[in-house]
Image (spheres, rainbow, N blue to C red):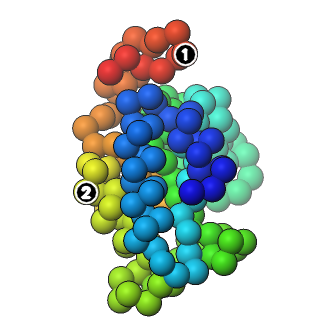
């Protein structure tokens, strides 16, 4: 796993850090070809969330999210976005390509491994498909928003 991925895991909610480490390791073992998985986003602050919400609304660009600050599972460190790095240098969000020629799209290999550990895939959402996105099952932003925080500002689960 690359340094960026390790750093992003270290900022996730403490309850999922070890699990996400195992998931990434398992994906690293499953992808035997040109692609490697990287976590492109993990924890996102409320302010950062408000900024991307503004994109395509009060700011220029295309809408990328329907979630304001506090309304994304990222804001609690319980979601990650992935990207595939091809040949150690090129980012790819291709969800059908089979970079290791094992007859299963590499992206779908990631989906299966996340699912095995109880993580929902944004690609299964009906209204706003978010293909790079995975979040720990069983949480809603409303439920998380109501929770108390610890000294490091993580919600107490
Ligand atoms: Zn996401």
Name which residue lies at 66% across and 50% down: 3
Q: Mark 1: is the Cβ under 8 angstroms from ligand 1? A: no
Q: Mark 2: is the Cβ under 8 angstroms from ligand 1? A: no
Q: Quadrant of the N terminus?
A: bottom right
Residue nearer the viewer, 53 or 119: 119
Dot 2, how many residues are within 10 Å of its Cα: few (below 14), some (14-19), or many (20+)? Answer: few
Q: Position of residue 51 (x, y in %)?
A: 67, 38
Q: Quadrant of residue 29?
A: bottom left
Q: Position of residue 45 (x, y in %)?
A: 60, 30
Name which residue lies at 40% across and 11% down: 148
Q: Position of residue 81 (x, y in %)?
A: 51, 53
Q: Decide: marks 2, 1 in contact (CB < 8 A)? A: no
Mark carried by residue 77: none
Dot 1, how many residues are within 10 Å of its Cα: few (below 14), some (14-19), or many (20+)? Answer: few
Q: In the displayed structure, would residue 120 be above or below residue 79?
A: below
Q: 103 left or right of 64?
A: left
Residue 8 is at least partly visible in this image? yes
Task: Give the secondary structure at mark 2.
Answer: helix
Residue 53 is at least partly visible in this image? no
Q: In the displayed structure, would residue 102 be above or below residue 138?
A: below
Q: Quadrant of the C terminus?
A: top left
> Label 2 belongs to which residue?
116
Name which residue lies at 56% across and 75% down: 35
Residue nearer the viewer, 114 or 6: 6
Task: Give the secondary structure at mark 1.
Answer: loop
Q: In the displayed structure, would residue 101 be above or below residue 139?
A: below
Q: Position of residue 116 (x, y in %)?
A: 25, 57
> Label 1 belongs to which residue?
152
Residue nearer the viewer, 9 or 150: 9
Q: Does label 2 or label 1 sit earlier along the sequence? A: 2
């Amino acid at each position: 796993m690359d340094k960026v991925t390790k750093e992003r895991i270290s900022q996730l909610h403490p309850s999922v850090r070890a699990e996400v480490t195992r998931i990434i390791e398992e994906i690293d073992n499953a992808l035997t070809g040109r692609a490697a998985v990287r976590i492109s986003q993990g924890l996102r602050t409320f302010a950062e969330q408000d900024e991307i919400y503004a994109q395509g609304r009060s700011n220029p660009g295309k809408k990328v999210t329907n979630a304001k600050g506090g309304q994304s599972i990222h804001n609690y460190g319980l979601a990650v976005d992935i990207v595939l790095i091809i040949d150690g240098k090129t980012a790819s969000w291709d969800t059908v390509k089979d970079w290791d020629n094992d007859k299963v799209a590499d992206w779908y290999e990631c989906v299966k491994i996340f699912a095995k550990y109880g993580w929902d895939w944004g690609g299964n959402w009906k209204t706003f498909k978010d293909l790079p996105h995975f979040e720990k099952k069983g949480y809603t932003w409303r439920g998380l928003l109501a929770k108390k925080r610890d000294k490091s500002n993580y919600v107490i689960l």
